[in-house]
Amino acid sequence: MPDHHFADRIFAAIERASTPLCVGLDPHLRHMPRAFRRAPDADPRAEDVRACLLEVIDIVADHVGMVKPQSAFYEQLGVEGIAVLKDVIAHGRAKGLVVILDGKRNDIGSTADAYCAAYLERGAPLEADAITVNPYLGLDSLEPFFAAARDHGKGVFVLVKTSNKGSSDYQDRRCDGTPLSDIVAASMSAASLAGQSEVSGWSSVGAVVGATHPLEGQRLRALLPRNLFLIPGYGAQGASARDAIATFVAGPRGLVGGVVNSSRAILFPSGAADLPLDGWRAAIREAVRHAATELGELTHPA
Amino acid sequence: MPDHHFADRIFAAIERASTPLCVGLDPHLRHMPRAFRRAPDADPRAEDVRACLLEVIDIVADHVGMVKPQSAFYEQLGVEGIAVLKDVIAHGRAKGLVVILDGKRNDIGSTADAYCAAYLERGAPLEADAITVNPYLGLDSLEPFFAAARDHGKGVFVLVKTSNKGSSDYQDRRCDGTPLSDIVAASMSAASLAGQSEVSGWSSVGAVVGATHPLEGQRLRALLPRNLFLIPGYGAQGASARDAIATFVAGPRGLVGGVVNSSRAILFPSGAADLPLDGWRAAIREAVRHAATELGELTHPA
């Protein structure tokens, strides 16, 4: 159903999997499993990374509705890495997954348009279903992404309150009493109204809100009642499943509110890197099943 | 002199050209000159963009010391566009130019490291001389870039006060009386001390400060006395040459303080798109000579 509104596609993907889990596809080269290296100590090549990630997508597609490749890990492999990214995005979409490209892009005017032409427009060379963007440059740097999302049935996630410790440096600064993250959320909320689904009322513009800050998350949910949250911090970064869904609200079939990402805990389960191919596959499957179930039992209790 | 400190390489490049002008290499597809299209109305292909930009580099290398490709315009051409970006960066460096990649990248921890592995480390697949980064995520997202710059003789330009109108939305917000841009500058200043040149005392960490805000620029110069500014807004965006160098200070041979970028006014001079190849070349040469001289007469008077 590629013509549906982005928010409704997310809801459908979550319903189908009965979990809001999204698997982060961040190929840290030094963690790449031995089964995909030519020799135990050989540096992984772009083609090894591709083979590994396409296998991961095949496995996780049975358990989740969304994946999130992080662009940096493909860019570090140069031109061949972008070819891998293209194949990862295409394979994920072909498997029916919603693919969120985590690039944290941002620029002004015609340059923002060029990023949309790269990733968001229908038929774009690296067409994904959504992209993450950074608000520092101001609303005029976000609006081209909002417009492209609306026009092409895509999603945009604006960094609002990130999961890292340093997110307090600027995002928590109080401007006339209001934290900067809330100011970004409030201006985004007004600008994103045009992108609401006629079915669910939720917007094609979402916010990145780290699971590591549950209190801030509650405050931001009040400001953004119908915007999907992309929630990092669950799993390896230390937030619990309950923290991760703290901003969820009652929906027609369970709790809804966004997408909970886990990368390392699923892509690189402890002890899996040295296993032979079959054992590695089983470890990935067990890791994704565990996280999908842990979140799903909270949002979609039987 | 690839082993010199980044700031000293910038100073040498400026001395050699007697101008702080940097040429922005932003291939807007709809502005691409006819001489590089297969047919007058044909969409430019990646190979056409490559041919055009390599010619531009050959021409501007006689007049300036720096170029700044903007990543979005290459990304919009997909995998082949990244191959063009790689060739543009390599050709600029082979011509002795300092190449600043304008990607406005940003992420945390190991993801920031992956961006450094892509663009800043010696031998990186898309190795440039410097990169632009976005501070919204906090200092822990900037430090990996600062460290890579220090360790590999590269530069980093942090977005502080950008040239667009929307830069007032968040960058001008007063937090306890201090604009956010100044808070970013102050924290950056402390963190960048480790990256100072033993020769000039200037840092490998610089700031993006738009020429369109000369008053804010003065304030930021006081906070960042030995940090290079990357200055957009001159030329097509409306700032004068005098505005563009308003933050410069007296150096050993003229006024110094950073790099003044001009993209469209040089890459797409008015009326040049429809000229035959020789006429187009002359127009590019005249455009870069004009801007280089206009700035050079202020910073390096005879």
Image (cartoon, coloured by chain):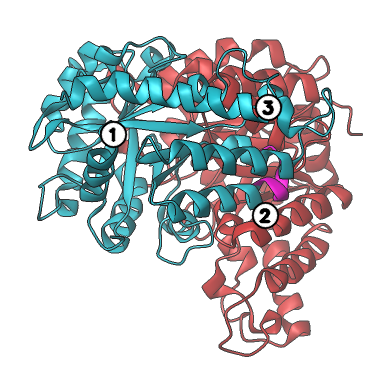
Chain colours: A red, B cyan
For mark 2, name the chain: A
The answer to whether residue A274 is above or below residue B12 is below
Determine the secondary structure under disc 3: loop
Task: Decide if residue A89 is in sight here.
Answer: yes
Do the residues bearing badges 3 and 1 touch, measured as CB atoms within 8 Å? no
In the rendered view, does B279 fall on the left or right side of A168? right
**Percent of width and height locating residue B98:** 37, 47
Q: How crowded is mark 2: few (under 14 residues within 10 Å), some or many (20 or more)?
A: many
Q: Outermost residue, front direction?
A: B278
The kind of residue on which mark 1 rests is: Ala
**Percent of width and height locating residue B206:** 26, 39
The residue shown at (60%, 72%) is A269
Determine the secondary structure under disc 1: strand
Mark 2 vs mark 1: same chain?
Answer: no
Residue of label 2: A82
The answer to whether residue B224 is above or below residue B89 is above
The residue shown at (40%, 25%) is B289
Q: Residues within 10 Å of mark 1 (few under 14, many from 20)?
A: many
Q: What stretch is highlighted in magenta?
A: B76-81
Pick the front one: A67 or B270: B270
Pick the front one: B185 or A31: B185
In the rendered view, does B94 fall on the left or right side of A291? left
The kind of residue on which mark 3 rests is: Met
For mark 3, name the chain: B
Residue of label 3: B32
Q: Which of marks 3 and 1 is in front?
A: 3
The answer to whether residue A23 is above or below residue A214 is below
Q: How crowded is mark 3: few (under 14 residues within 10 Å), some or many (20 or more)?
A: many
